Amino acid sequence: MIAAAQVCRSRGGHRVVDDVSFSVAAGEIVGLIGLNGAGKTSLIDCLAGLAAPDEGQIRVAGHAPGSRAARAATGTLLQQPGLPARLRVAETMALFAGLQGRPVCPKLAAALGLAAIADQRVDRLSGGQRQRLALALALQHDPAVILLDEPATALDPGMRRDLAALLADRRAAGAAILMATHDLAEAASLCDRVLVMAGGRLLTGGRPADLIAGLPSKIRMVTAQALPGAESASIEITAQDVAAAVRQLLAQAGDVPVLELSVTSASLADVVLAAQEQPHG
């Protein structure tokens, strides 16, 4: 549903998307993660047809980005969505639904908590309310492809949970979803795959659990007194084989009482940082 091949884009003499290739299949949620300035938003702009790549090819639902067919098949949430300030929420939803040739979807409005604020003007909404409205506008025409740039911005924990359920439903219905996010816990729990970007390039990608499993865990042991050869009573190491490392630490402690023994598993944040540290040609 989404296919990008060797996509490059420069801005201000700087390459912000650099030889990027990937795909997102129907019924799949793919997370786009990385530090600020990694190129995530620039890539989504190209996919949405808001910016033309300098090189490479993109197809969205089989069409060129920005074409009428691609726009009809795509729902897009930008990081700073432009909303009609003087219209009311219900009027805005009706306007966009009409442009898409669809009726307003009351079920979606209810799921995003918009029914209760239907009569409020857009310029008087809170940040979270504006984000919910922007999500509704992106999703109400039941798009086959969904592009989301930081969709959980300004949402409270309850609405984040509801958004995750909504996206899971869209995935089950066959939508292809690409989601740029800084919420790595959300990416780990919701995404089928993640793509790690830095400096405009894709550094690595795969299932979150597989990427995390490839990194060592951190082990900390605190003893009643410093062990021979140790500078303090606290020892911290990293290890891939946690069980073997713990056995070795306990054997090293011998008869000295162990006051604390903790294991911290790697996370997607560690995946991002590790990818940044690797040399890339």
Image (cartoon, rainbow, N blue to C red):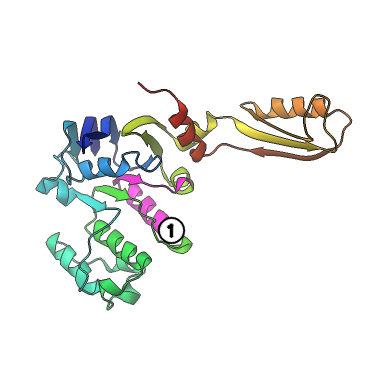
Residue visible at 16% across and 49% down in the picture: 71
| Residue at the spot of label 1 | 160
| Residue 243 picture location, percent across and down | 69, 29
Q: Is residue 237 visible?
A: yes
257 and 207: which one is in front?
257
| Residue 164 within the magenta-colored segment of the rendering | yes
Residue visible at 70% across and 36% down in the picture: 220
Residue visible at 32% across and 75% down in the picture: 117
| Residue 255 within the magenta-colored segment of the rendering | no
| Residue 27 picture location, percent across and down | 32, 43
Residue at the left extreme, as displayed: 68
Amino acid type, mark 1: Arg
The answer to which quarter of the image holds residue 80 is bottom left
Above-or-below relation of 245 to 110: above
* Image quarter hosting the C terminus: top left
Above-or-below relation of 190 to 153: above
165 and 263: which one is in front?
263
Residue at the top extreme, as displayed: 281
Question: Is residue 273 toward the left or the right of residue 97 in the image?
Answer: right
Residue at the right extreme, as displayed: 255
Q: Secondary structure at mark 1?
A: helix
Residue visible at 27% across and 30% down in the picture: 18
Q: Is residue 112 visible?
A: no
The answer to which quarter of the image holds residue 162 is bottom left
246 and 94: which one is in front?
246
The residue range painted magenta reads 160-184
Question: Is residue 275 toward the left or the right of residue 222 in the image?
Answer: left
| Residue 164 picture location, percent across and down | 41, 54
